[in-house]
Image: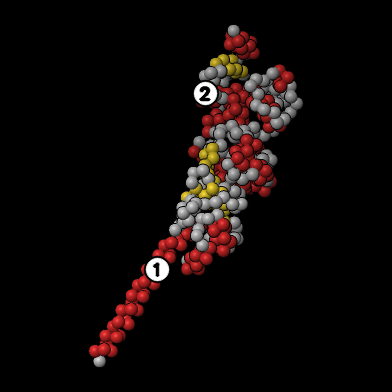
Amino acid sequence: MNYIVRTICKVCAWILGSLFVLAGSAAALIFYMNAAPQDGAKTTSTVTSLDTGEVRLEVREGESASSVGMRLEEANLIKQYYAWQLLCHLRPAYLQAGMYQFKEKCSLIELHTLFTSGQQILLSITIPEGSTLKKTAMLLEKDDICTAEDFLAAARNDKLLHEYHIYGNSFEGFLYPDTYYFTVHYPANLVVRTMADTFYRRLKTLDIDVTAYSAEDFYAKVTLASIIEREYRIEDEAPLMAGVFLRRLKTGMRLESCATVVYVMTELLNQPHPKKIFHRDLELESPYNTYMHRGLPPSPIAAPGAIALQAAFFPTETDYLFFRIIDPSAGRHYFSKTFDDHIKAGALFIK
């Protein structure tokens, strides 16, 4: 009887020992397979290794976990494709499409958690005040957010313009210049929506009531703001410039804004930004050239910021009809009521 008991105890001890050995081996295998490969990642056609020691990979729309695993193994980001498959089976969750950036030595579990969380990389992009649609499009494409072509198409989309009740044929002037955060390959129409929504939110903080204007009058105000944005250098002069422009419009004078001439040269004629404007430039034929045509240009010429918007909607009433730069380094202008004073100011500065 004692022999049988001892035998059973030995068998149980052997079984338990074997189980511990198996459990330890399994744990060691899991730990080994979970760890990132020691020799580092490889750049492939679908995976990019960055100089920062990070890796960028896009999970495509509708892509299977199996496909992602094969690409991870090809780029030497995981040790074994089948371990990835097993993990995906044990932790069933959809991989979220998008662009991801992560450190090179990520564990298997960390990668799976990242791809199922949808925590994509966000790129910071700053659109400067006074930017045109073309310049904004180039900045977005440079940062790999969306193509310039897609952005410009979205910014001129009739359906989107109608939704935002914009009087013109593009979002020029209605995309607020600010710092934004987008994912790589972000849909262009959502970029436009985000910037347009920011524009209208900003108007509220400036106490500008859009509903107080007709669509056409509101469009004219934004167009004026875009000209002021490209003209003013010192903040306290912006409302006064607005007052001068409005008085010239009221009296039937041409605006004669150099900013509109530069717009013709750079945006319509695709010329480089000029350092100086010559008399021949003032004669360029275009409805945007306010030296040649009376009234406001057909549409905004840039994205106005808060100062220019506030100046256009809350201008300073003035008897001045002219202004010209007198201190280029400081950006200070001389304002005058008569053309003679305007000319004298110019002569004084030249001297």
Drawn side of residue 21 relative to residue 196, left or right: left
Q: Residues within 10 Å of mark 1 (few under 14, many from 20)?
A: few
Residue 231, image x, y percentages:
59, 25
* Quadrant of the image occupied by residue 295: top right
Q: Give the residue drawn at x 62%, y 48%.
A: 189
Mark-to-mark CA distance, 2 and 1: 73 Å
Instruction: Identify which residue, 240 or 228, lies in the foreground.
Output: 228
Under mark 2, the amino acid is: Ile
Q: Give the residue drawn at x 32%, y 81%.
A: 12
Viewer can see residue 295? no
The N terminus - image quarter: bottom left
Q: What SS does tag 2 mark? A: loop
Viewer can see residue 241? yes
The C terminus - image quarter: top right
Q: Give the residue drawn at x 51%, y 62%.
A: 80
- Protein image colouring: secondary structure
Q: Which residue is mark 1?
A: 25
Instruction: Spot the residue most to the right.
Output: 285
Drawn side of residue 272 relative to residue 33, left or right: right
Instruction: Spot the residue most to the left.
Output: 2
Q: Which mark is residue 67?
A: none
Q: What SS does tag 1 mark? A: helix
Closer to the eye: label 2 or 1 = 1
Q: Which mark is residue 234?
A: 2
Residue 179, image x, y percentages:
52, 39
Q: Give the residue drawn at x 70%, y 28%.
A: 271
